[in-house]
Image (spheres, coloured by chain):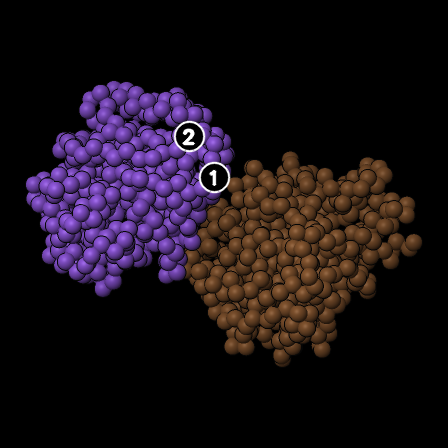
Chain colours: A brown, B purple
Amino acid sequence: MNIKELPFTIDAIAKAYAEGVRPEAVIAEAFRRLEAVGDPGIFIHEARETALAEAAALGKPDGRPLWGVPYVAKDNIDVAGMPTTAACPDFEYRPADDAFVVSKLRAAGAICLGKTNLDQFATGLVGVRTPYPVPRNALDPEIVPGGSSAGSAVAVAQGMAAFSLGTDTAGSGRVPAALNSIVGLKPTLGALSSSGVVPACRTLDTISIFAMTVADAWTVFDAACSFDAKDAYSRDISVSDLSAVPPALRIGVPDTKSLIAFDNGMQETDFRGTVAKLASSGATIVELDFEPFYAVARMLYEGAWLAERVSAVGDRLTEKPETLHPTTRAILEPGLALSAVDAFEGQYRLKELERACLNLLAKVDALCVPTIPSFVSVKEIEADPIGPNSLLGTYTNFVNLLDMCGIAIPTGTRADGRPGSVTLLGEKGRDALCAAVALTLEAGSMGATVWERPTHTAIEPGAPRDSEIAIAVCG
Amino acid sequence: MNIKELPFTIDAIAKAYAEGVRPEAVIAEAFRRLEAVGDPGIFIHEARETALAEAAALGKPDGRPLWGVPYVAKDNIDVAGMPTTAACPDFEYRPADDAFVVSKLRAAGAICLGKTNLDQFATGLVGVRTPYPVPRNALDPEIVPGGSSAGSAVAVAQGMAAFSLGTDTAGSGRVPAALNSIVGLKPTLGALSSSGVVPACRTLDTISIFAMTVADAWTVFDAACSFDAKDAYSRDISVSDLSAVPPALRIGVPDTKSLIAFDNGMQETDFRGTVAKLASSGATIVELDFEPFYAVARMLYEGAWLAERVSAVGDRLTEKPETLHPTTRAILEPGLALSAVDAFEGQYRLKELERACLNLLAKVDALCVPTIPSFVSVKEIEADPIGPNSLLGTYTNFVNLLDMCGIAIPTGTRADGRPGSVTLLGEKGRDALCAAVALTLEAGSMGATVWERPTHTAIEPGAPRDSEIAIAVCG
């Protein structure tokens, strides 16, 4: 086997190990790919030597689900022995312990290659709000890499890590997936512990997972999901195997009036294609007026939750504002003026909108939306650091405020060569349902690689099945 | 029948109606009792003529559960055609519609006698923070009536209303029950709609029910509980009949170190007596360190939730502060200085404490606590308007912050002649379990009346039973 051609999917790596390839060789190949890509913006901290040592110490394959699988972690997630910066050099500390999720991945055999770049303090959807070199979009350097989990998304899309950890408060685990043609799994809040994660909005944060395929993302989720008694926001959620979609699947989509899509109609065309695919596989498409969801989305940066981000950076905003990225600082500052009355009144307003949204969600099993309404160029964001960023959050900002889960997946190439992407969204706990639907839709390029998307065994929607039967998924 | 001797319990009233007594006579008797008591502080608005007219219009008994049953409503709950003041004359408005719960009671045949006095804007546990005459405690005028649902509790304890509506944010539906020897049912948040209720802390408010017996309170709860699509905080909860207590009941109580009780040991003696009764009927008593509950309790008035009360009174606090009771104003003012960061950080802190409390609650089916740690005199509260009020909330303040339900019941007379009271508390949705346990414990005087407490059919704890069997309760 020529290791340079080894696709970094979990199954392909496991197969290589079964054939005698050593993890050290895979780790070395990961860093060779990093060098070949030549993007100094992906990592804030590279851990080549540590990773090689861990690989050497692994012994023989032992059946652990992520044995010898290389991954990267967003630099707001602690990995013992590596610095955590949240893309704010002055914030740097060296954690003694792994984040809870990192410890789970370590226990499953995964090897961390280093810590990746992000929009500072996870505030942004563009990936350029960092004092470090900006990561390049894996497909087109004129397009923003997406954020805030920029480096984590690019590392997977460039084929140097089999998966990566991001975080997702407003869409940071989904928008970069769309911009780099990969999968972004944003679990139900509390499914993945936040112990050892730098908060953005503590009531809305979750770790997210990037991978090339839905099956890989699910394997990682399964390994990482575990109740953490030390995280007050952790929930006791059991991860089921991915099963078939229900026989009478109902998928909600924005109606014509409320669909927001640009790029000369290309984003809409791509989205309609996916919806048609869903319909032809037997799903009932339910058109919904999305205004209540958009109203919730607007609350995230315009409303009281900004104060959570202010709380997360502590005194820095008032005592050492010069240590913040200018855009981050400009976004956070209005949060200082919000009163506790504002905070509670924002929550009342959310509760009312939530009722309207739940009434819509009661009509369907899941929603399908474009992950982003359009692509955003680096130039556009240089001209206006905030407007295009907000636009990118159209279909993501409302999700965590409504305690929903979601998974973004590539859907194939648009007429202009850019990757299409949709997100399946469901009420809390419907992670497996969303992923199962996503499994029937994922298509197109695996990031910037030339690798062929593996086929998987999917149960046809509409086929009779026992909803309790767990279906094995081959990635 | 001499109507002057008719106990105003729901069953006794129904029996009188079955024997031919007219509802007009019962309403007239209610107002005769009010005159006999001679307390100008109970009602803010008396509705004698309306009530008599409604009684006359009732026709013949038609099987509705509250047909012709007289009740009173706290004056922060709308009754169509009567003014609502929340004990702030300047706030007065005349609602066109009944509060949702009032409309349910009307549909069940109940007749509202008027609107009762309260600690202004439901802020207080003493009942004296009102610009109207202070209601007198039904048992001892030297003791505070308890609040904030003061008039509603006293009206029931004086035997002039078969039940009453209060509200409960910090204990306003339980503390006055203890001080007047009646039952106070505080349902799970969202079980009773808040539509048409003046908010105190919108995230923590609920309507509560006072009655002479657990069975009566439950009958009213059953009639009033219904999902309200217009109240964003309403929950779809189904009310089961009161069933027997589980065969292996585990009741948590404060351990010796964390029990807070005064009155020369009398409150502790009374409480120990109830716990012994529980133990002798087969329940397992589990001693718990209550510190996490107390830590939550302290957050209610010392922390961010004060801003909800500020929000509830709107511009009044800054524009027309002279229209507020001086104590209410003094309590609310610090809420103006709280920031949104304070609000969210309070919620983080609560979430952490909640985890500790849930770990304790997981060990038991319900908690049993003294409803109040001691009695408080009118003189004491005149000397210090705030300290003794806080003391009264020891066992009540944490309950709504933790989304728990509860029911306060009289337990008999202490050596000093004052009524004992305990509260059964459970996790959300355990209203029926708490009430079922309460049913086995209620004892002692029915308010200030000389009526005999009716016997009821209770299933012995520990007896084998099918948990799905609904047991009819005879009040």
| Residue ID at (74%, 61%) | A458
Taking the image as shown, residue A374 lies to the left or right of residue A202, namely right
Picture quarter with the C terminus of chain B: top left
**In the drawing, what numbered circle is on residue A173?**
none
| Amino acid beneath label 1 | Ser
Same chain letter for marks 1 and 2: yes
Q: Residue furthest right?
A: A1
In percent of width and height, residue A295 lies at: 46, 65
In the rendered structure, the answer to whether residue A229 lies left or right of residue A337 reads: right
Query: Which residue shows up at 55% across the image and 54% down it?
Result: A428
Residue B461, numbered circle: 2
Name the image quarter holding the N terminus of chain B.
top left
Query: Which residue is rendered at x = 28% and y = 42% of the image?
Result: B216
B180 or A19: nearer the viewer: B180
- Judged from the image, the secondary structure of the residue bearing numbered disc 1 is loop
Looking at the image, which is closer to me, A379 or B450? B450
**Tag 2, which chain?**
B
How packed is label 1: few (under 14 Cα within 10 Å), some, or many (20 or more)?
few
The front one of B289 and B163 is B163
Write down the residue under mark 1: B467
Q: CA distance from mark 1 to mark 2?
A: 12 Å
